[in-house]
Amino acid sequence: MELFEHVSDDVTILEAHGRVDGTTAKEFGDRLVALIHAGRRRIVVDLDNIAYISSAGFRALILADRTTEQREGKLALCGVTGEVMRLFELGTFLELFLICPNQQDAISKLRQP
């Protein structure tokens, strides 16, 4: 898995590439929590280039979402399609997250009061 980070004004975008599984989920979760602890209040996680996400990956996302809320921030996901969308549906995770079709929509939603 590779992680790429960039900032669009007040929103941090974290793009994940590859697989978020038992081997890579800790790195993924640690990176998200580090961003939150660094004061990033609006975070978009782009999963468009993720081929697979395991329960460990979902746990990392849930922890990041909760931590963001505790710090009065917002987290959105985008690029949830194909097999990854199917896994979100099977795990009934769709209602847990703000899921947007693309980065621009996610950025827009995070900037709303």
Image (cartoon, helix red, strand yellow):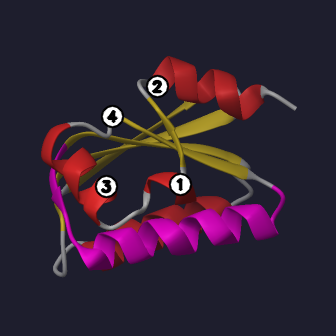
Q: What amino acid type is highlighted by mark number 3?
A: Glu
Mark 3 / mark 2, whichever is N-terminal:
3
Name which of mark 1 and mark 2 comes first in the sequence: 1
Mark 3, secondary structure of its residue:
helix
Residue 83: percent from left, percent from top? 14, 47
Which residue occupies the foreground of this view, 86 or 18? 86
Q: Pointer 1: what residue? A: 95
Quadrant containing the N terminus in the rendered view: bottom left
Label 4 neighbourhood size at 10 Å, few (<14), some (14-19), many (20+)? many
Label 4–label 2 contact, CB within 8 A = yes
Please, what is the three-letter code of the amino acid marked with disc 4?
Gly
- Is residue 64 covered in magenta? yes
Q: Number of callouts in the render?
A: 4
**Front position in the image: 113 or 10:** 113
Closest to the camera, between mark 4 and mark 1, is 1
Query: For mark 2, what is the residue?
Result: 103
Taking the image as shown, residue 19 lies to the left or right of residue 90, namely left
Crowdedness near tag 1: few (<14), some (14–19) or many (≥20) residues, C-alpha within 10 Å: few
Residue labelled with disc 3? 89
Above or below 40: residue 60: below
Q: In the rendering, at what x and y percent does residue 76 appear?
A: 56, 43
Q: Earlier in the sequence, mark 3 or mark 1?
A: 3
- Look at the numbered disc 4 and give the secondary structure of its residue: loop
The residue segment tinted magenta is: 50-72
- Label 3 Cα crowd, 10 Å radius (few <14 / some 14-19 / many 20+): few
* Residue ID for mark 4: 79
State whether residue 105 is above or below residue 59: above
Distance CA(mark 4)–CA(mark 1): 16 Å
